[in-house]
Amino acid sequence: MAEFLMPKLGADMTAGKLVAWRVKPGDVVSRGAIVAEVETDKGVIEVEIFSNGVIDKLLVEPGTVVPVGTPLATLREPIGAESPTERIPVPSPRVPVKDQPLAPAAPVPMNAPPRWRASPAARELARTLGIDLATVPGTGPDGAITRQDVQRATETAPPASATADRASRMRQAIAAAMTRSKREIPHYYLSTTIDLHNALTWLAQRNAARSVTERVLPGVLLLKAVALALREVPQFNALWTDGQAKPSEAIHLGVAISLRGGGLVAPAIHHTDQLSLDELMRKLTDLVNRARTGGLRSSEMADPTLTVTNLGDQGAESVFGVIYPPQVAIVGFGKIGERPWVVGGQVVPRSVLTATLSADHRVSDGHQGSLFLATVDQLLQEPDKL
């Protein structure tokens, strides 16, 4: 018998609220299946399971706040071919909802039907009204949510101040994590200015033959360059645990994403270095959409190995980030601007940006940090190799 525990969805998380189960006793689950939804200060996260088995018992009712590490369910080994249970597929992502906290969920029977079953009309109305389907009791066939159910839910929707309350909680969580980071981590900071003429010229030519929806943004080149640079200077792709740096074999870049209701999250794009630019563009777009509509997954929140923050779109010349524990570095990019630049002894206009590195002095030093930024620069000079 194995236990499924409340996961730690970020270094600053100590407890979470179980919002809804997506499984019931007797369901067969496989690694990667989404089995529950958990609310943290940073939003509602779809929680995956990382072992195979049969759900034996659900130990926690929806609406309960429990500490990290608390058993949520027990699993047993499948009986075999004669087992009466059927394997359930990994559910598709939840219907996007607005950035707002869920209304306190009343306990529901453990054998309640999945809350994401809803008619198309109900889903459309929920999107329009900003109602989370996980909070709506269904009265349709087999417990499906109808349009009338969504309309009734608006009568008990959380007050407008709820969004502000969640933003306040998120700010408090961010402040606590950043205070801990500055107190415990000996930061050092480096910056360099990168000539993006080659990269932007190559990208413009590449995008010219594509439709708008297929074009790749400059920020994707920056992410890929950082990921590949971590292969060559791996000291920055590590986590500080148990008093030492533990290198990570996989490169999972965390991407800082601002939320519409305030605050930010930094979920991971897994195996960033192995993705093509087109794949990376699609994954980035999907990640931003889900971060802002409430569909992030537990694995994306739990395992970034280095975070990238880009404030160029907001007009910042540069950004020196604060390291998010247990990571050991954070990379920042400012806006792309045109400046006079010396090329072959001539002063010419060039599109440039400032790249920064905030790093943990317990793990690396300025020499290694300079090599890392120089590697990012070199990679961007040959964009066709990204």
Image (cartoon, rainbow, N blue to C red):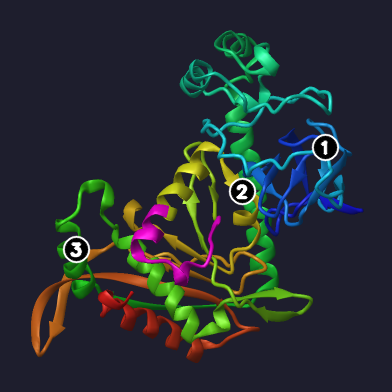
- The furthest residue to the front: 82
- The furthest residue to the right: 1
Q: Quadrant of the C terminus?
A: bottom left
Nearer the viewer's eye, disc 1 or disc 3?
Answer: 1
Kind of residue at disc 1: Pro
Q: Position of residue 347 (x, y in %)?
A: 9, 81
Kind of residue at disc 3: Arg
Q: Nearer the viewer, residue 183 or 107?
A: 107
Q: Say left or right for 181 vs 294.
A: right
Tags 2 and 3 in contact by the CB under 8 Å rule?
A: no
Query: Residue sitting at 43 percent across and 73 percent down?
Result: 226
Q: Nearer the viewer, residue 21 or 369?
A: 21
290 up-or-down from 164: above or below:
below
Q: Position of residue 121 (x, y in %)?
A: 49, 16
In primary-sequence order, the first of circles 2 and 1 is 1
Kind of residue at disc 2: Arg
Tags 1 and 3 in contact by the CB under 8 Å rule?
A: no
Q: Which mark is residue 53?
A: none
Q: Which residue is mark 1?
A: 84
Tags 2 and 1 in contact by the CB under 8 Å rule?
A: no
Circle 3 sits in a helix, a strand or a loop, which is it?
Answer: helix
**Quadrant in which residue 354 is drawn:** bottom left
Q: Which residue is mark 3?
A: 206
Nearer the viewer's eye, disc 2 or disc 1?
Answer: 1
Q: Which residue is mark 2?
A: 297
In primary-sequence order, the first of circles 1 and 3 is 1
Residue range corresponding to the magenta coloring: 267-282
Q: Say left or right for 10 vs 53.
A: left
Distance from Cα at disc 2 to Cα at disc 3: 32 Å
**Is any part of residue 346 visible from this angle?**
yes
Distance from Cα at disc 1 to Cα at disc 3: 54 Å
Query: Residue sitting at 53 percent across and 17 percent down?
Result: 122
